[in-house]
Image (spheres, helix red, strand yellow):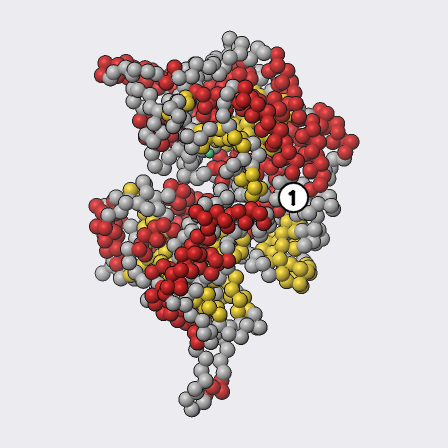
Amino acid sequence: MHKSILLTIIISLNINANTLLEPTSLSKDLYLENILDGEYIEAIDKPEKFLGFEYATRVATPEQITSAIQAWSNQSDRLKVVEYARSHENRPLHAVFISSPNNLDSLDEIKNKVTQLSDARITNDRVAKTLIDELPAIAWMAYSIHGNETSGADAALGIIYHLIASKDTTVIDMLDEMVIIIDPVMNPDGRARFAKNLEQYRGTAPNYDDQSLIHTGDWPYGRTNHYYYDLNRDWVYLTQPETQGRVSLINEWKPQILVDAHEMGSQDTFMTGPAREPINKNVDYDLIKWGNVFAQDQGEAFDDRNWRFYTGEWHEDLYPGYSFYVAFKGTLGILYEQSRMAEDGVRRPEGTIQSYKESVHHQYVSTLINLKTLRENSKAMYKDYWDGRKLNISNDSKYANRSYVILPTKNNGRLNVLANKLKAQEIEIYKNNKPISVSNVLKQNGVIEDDYVIPTGSMIIPNKQPEAPLISAILEFDAEIDELVLQEEKQKSIKNGSSLMYDTTAFNFTMMYGLPAVTVPQNITRNLDVWSPFQETIEVNEDAVMWAVDGKDDRSVAFAARLMEQNIEVRIIDKDSSLSGHNLSRGSVVVIAMDNPVFKNLHQVVNSSALALDLSVVSIESGFGSEELPDWGGRHFRLLEKPQIAILSHEGFSSYDVGVSWWSLDHHLGIRHSQLNSSLTAYGDLRRYNTIILPSGNPDISDYAKSMLMDWVKQGGTLIANNASSRSIISSNIGNVKNLNKTFENSKTFNIDLMREIYSLEDQIDITNANDNKVNLQIDYPWESSDKTYTKDQLEMRDKWQSLLMPSGAFVATRNDNEHWLTFGTDNILPVLYSNYPILMTGGNSEAVLRIGELIPNSEISENRTINWSQIPAGYDMNVRMSGLVWPEASQRIANSAYLTRERIGKGQIILFSGEPNFRGSARGTNRLWLNAVVYGSGLGTSSRVTP
Ligand SMILES: [Zn+2]
């Protein structure tokens, strides 16, 4: 098949020759250096054989690289190829092990030695010394995780060839001492997408304009994978098959260095070397020391060739989900950032053109020089590694007296996922079989509790383990940032809105997953069993009147969605209930035989749906709920409606948010849906859908199209929007939700609405006053107990100042309406990831389903206190920040605003998320709210349709 493609290209070029003029110059003449300049074994095919063009003058497709690797594995005894994953589009991902034939024959033995060296509980200093003497150096060299940053993978192709085909004795000697693992194309789907763009936009003359389509490519661009995920943010969240396979193999091999070769802005030069602050405090300082050694050698190699480069600058390492997660495991991560040349080359302001081939050469030379540095320092690096691994489990480390505890929940589905992510990183997890009394426990809201009992069945992760630094990096509630860094960050924010932070400043797993957890300042070791996944029990009796799954478990939403797709009528119990001895959480999903008279094999469908999700089902023989609890004929058994879903997509939308919305439907639900070009809102038939999702973005949707969409809502549609799309809906004055800056004129009304919401939860009344016949002249009105109010001008000035200091990815606390169907499965306090999002204010009949700020009782506070437009009631403090950088000014600005709103419009509704609830496929807490909106919205939030 491969040959026939090449043949087609050649024929079409010949035809083109008759219709198109030859260019006056060729890009291949720009750079005359030979990258592959050694003496090579003739029996091994040169890269050109697989490319059909001169090596490194164009971008090789993933298929071309794969065919080269496969051919070479038959031609050389210096490499062994491992397929570690398949992409969503079914492309193979390869790790190419290159070493001497002897080493390749004993890979298992080498791997065992590395495993021994990594665990100081089974290895002593004497054995470690022998292991270090015997072990070859191990390098993992990985390229082009961002698919449109192409030069790395092309360099990898040349490197593999060079190492397996070179006749040079230094290469052959090097392979005796090293195992080099080349991961040439980390994101084949993204690269294929970009390679297709190159093919489509290629003309006759070379193009050096980095603004042209051949350089930029099309939406959704080649950076991301099939579902538009940034794979270089997925190394600890592990949501994508590319990362899952890769991390598993890297963790087996524990390489000494991991090179991650990228590209950056076209007009830039080349960056490498260790990061600048903020650097995650769980990184071993030895690695930073070694980073400088590698950078220095690499810099000298660049100097020798007159190539420009720099180190540090914008490169920080706080977020642990980059490839640099390996640093927490003792591996030196090395970043390359080559300026992006796409294809022919790029003209720079000084008039010169840097060619694509030269950019490949930079990556190539960097790789060889890093390998040389590793070879020279491998033994010393192993010694540092061993010392680090010993420290991780010693009583002297900062991890010695700390355990992370995730509290029990009926949300087995979510806990199982978390357990799998932790285990994939070789983290040991346990469950306590007895309550454990502990003291000075840190809760997620920052409160320290002196006496605390850990309930039986909690997930316990003692920090004192071989993977101690990684455990801390992903489970500690707050990543420490130096005061000086914070100072500079604040100055920059106020000066011009710039930031030192390259990614989110909060990322811990338990807040991300919306799972309550505590940190205990002691090493918990007693009354623990090794963690095992929950055993689900599926009991589907044919003669039951109904079958139910618990609504706390996230998988219950999929259960409902998948049954509805098969046209089965499904109900939800919107209140905690107890039926036939089974206690069911609010939001439990039930299938009632009487609702589905036409299904003769109903119980079998229920059974197989539960099996597919590995989800417990109970059979219920009676619809009677005792006392106040719901009974099956009452109003708490609410009928759902099958969601018919469309996601608006394309140019203007955030590809990340489109991708993760799409992935969420495919991953969590597996039901049919359509991704629509947003222009269809004007001329398509929207009646096919009852649920339309607007991912975050600023698409060019005409006023006419917007009015069509609103007509559709009024006729019963459920419109769900995220972040920038929510901003755009409220700025079009659709509905009653407003952006904060439009509310200062009548801020008091918003405060009264807020007070109604808070005081409606008040559970104490003065019975004497209530029964008094006289008019009471001493009534306390909540908004009058504080004399402080701000004028419109004051609020506006505050807002301008506060808006300079908004967070860029931090967790803030939200309290929720725990009677609302959107909050099924959600705890009362939910951490949400927050950035510079629209600040939603509800008024009229719009509902604030989640509001920012946790009310914490404090009996010493006797009066209401004012923050900007709103008040904190007497008797309470308010917590906003939970993790990451949230300036106090930002806390004030967003306190009491809504994160999630829902408003009835006509027969339909609009649901707005201030943020991006599916963030990186990992924000499980907010993802549940979104899944509730998507699957339950049409049934629970709109007028039900009756067919006459
Ligand atoms: Zn990149």
User: What's the residue at 25%, 51% (across, down)?
Assistant: 706
- 346 on left or right of 510: left
User: What's the residue at 64%, 33% (across, down)?
Assistant: 289
Tell me residue 558's x, y (percent). Answer: 43, 50
User: What's the residue at 49%, 25% (across, down)?
Assistant: 308
Where is 693 relative to 254, above or below? below
User: What's the residue at 59%, 36% (across, down)?
Assistant: 326
Tell me residue 620's x, y (percent). Answer: 47, 61
170 and 267: which one is in front? 267
- 437 on left or right of 791: right
Where is 381 relative to 652, above or below? above
Q: Determine which quarter of the picture holds residue 745.
A: bottom left
34 and 549: which one is in front? 34
Q: What type is the residue that disc 1 sits on? A: Ala
Element carrying mark 1: helix
Please indicate, yes or no, whether residue 604 appears anywhere in the rendered image: no
- Which residue in the protein does label 1 denote? 468
789 and 547: which one is in front? 789
837 and 586: which one is in front? 837
Label 1 crowd bin: few (<14), some (14–19), many (20+), radius 10 Å: many
